[in-house]
Image (tube, rainbow, N blue to C red):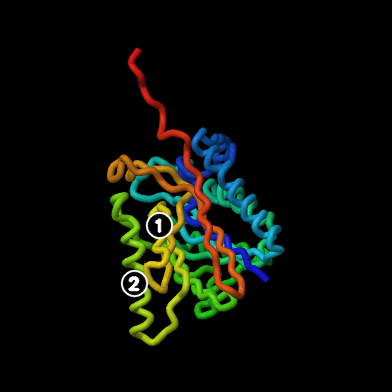
Amino acid sequence: MTVVLAHVSDVHAGSTIALCQTKVALDDGGSYEASKAQRWLWQNWVAYWDEVKRACIKRKAPLYIVFNGDLVEGNHHGTTQILSGNPNAQAAVVNAAMAIPLALNPDKLFFVRGTEAHVGASASAEERIADGLRRDKRPVQGDPDTGTASWWHLRLQVYNTLIDVAHHGRTGQREHTRASAAALQAHDILLSHVKKGHRPPDLCLRAHNHKFNDSFDACQVRVASSGAWQLATAHVHKIATDSLADIGGHIVTVDEDGYDLKKVEFTPEARGAIWRAS
């Protein structure tokens, strides 16, 4: 039997430039309405999960889902790019976004902790989300070493494929050096395992940088970083004006013969409006 593993990260629910349902009720009786860009992200979020569903139906496969960090935006660094500083408003976006993959009745759910600036000290927001779903009898697979519903570092074996998942990966800041960062990390992971006499993972899934990146067959360990569900923030406009966030996630199919990784990416038709002289 084949297993389908969906890997998504960096949802940043609550950001005014991340995916959002049409309208969010606010605490004082008002509401927040999603922008055109947010509606585009939401449309692609639905399309991604439709593709996951098709993969499961085609292979008659159970579905495992890994949410790899930064589920919410939080209230950080004095940002104004949040729909509300009230955590309940951001939780409403999480609930609406999570309803789509949960409707697929996944067989296993895994939550990996992200960046504390976004999800709180010790990733408390993500632990709260994962634990809430676990209490709701959803198939959340927690960390047996700590008893928590979420993981700092997830290692799971499906058949003979060992998959290693953590939020923080590496990427190059320049387009022509990005791939080398994944290859270097793959070699570092391989060496760190070999030096301790441990079995190296076959596939490492990473996130955080909002860029797809893949070491492919640079060495025995493969490192693949996922895209995000948030467009460029004010900070990105400052440090990487020409760079666009990669939008999307991975679909990994695993069977007795190994695994196959598919990148599901959504690209806007244009970078934005152009002012033209008349």
Q: Secondary structure at mark 1?
A: strand
- For disc 1, the marked residue is 213
In the picture, the disc for residue 187 is 2
In front here: 200 or 273? 200
The numbered mark, 2 or 1, whose residue comes first in the sequence reads 2
Assess disc 2: are there few (<14), some (14-19) or many (≥20) residues with their C-alpha within 10 Å of its C-alpha.
Answer: some
Which mark identifies residue 73?
Answer: none
In percent of the image, x 37 and y 76: which residue is there? 190
The image shows residue 19 at horizontal and vertical percentages of 52, 44
Q: Nearer the viewer, residue 143 or 26?
A: 143
When the figure is inspected, residue 19 is found, relative to residue 113, above or below; the finding is above
Q: Position of residue 131 (x, y in %)?
A: 58, 66
What is the spatial separation of the Cα atoms under label 2 and label 1, in whole angstroms? Answer: 15 Å
Answer left or right for 65 relative to 273. Answer: right
Instruction: Let me know if residue 87 appears in the view.
Output: no
Q: Position of residue 1 (x, y in %)?
A: 68, 71
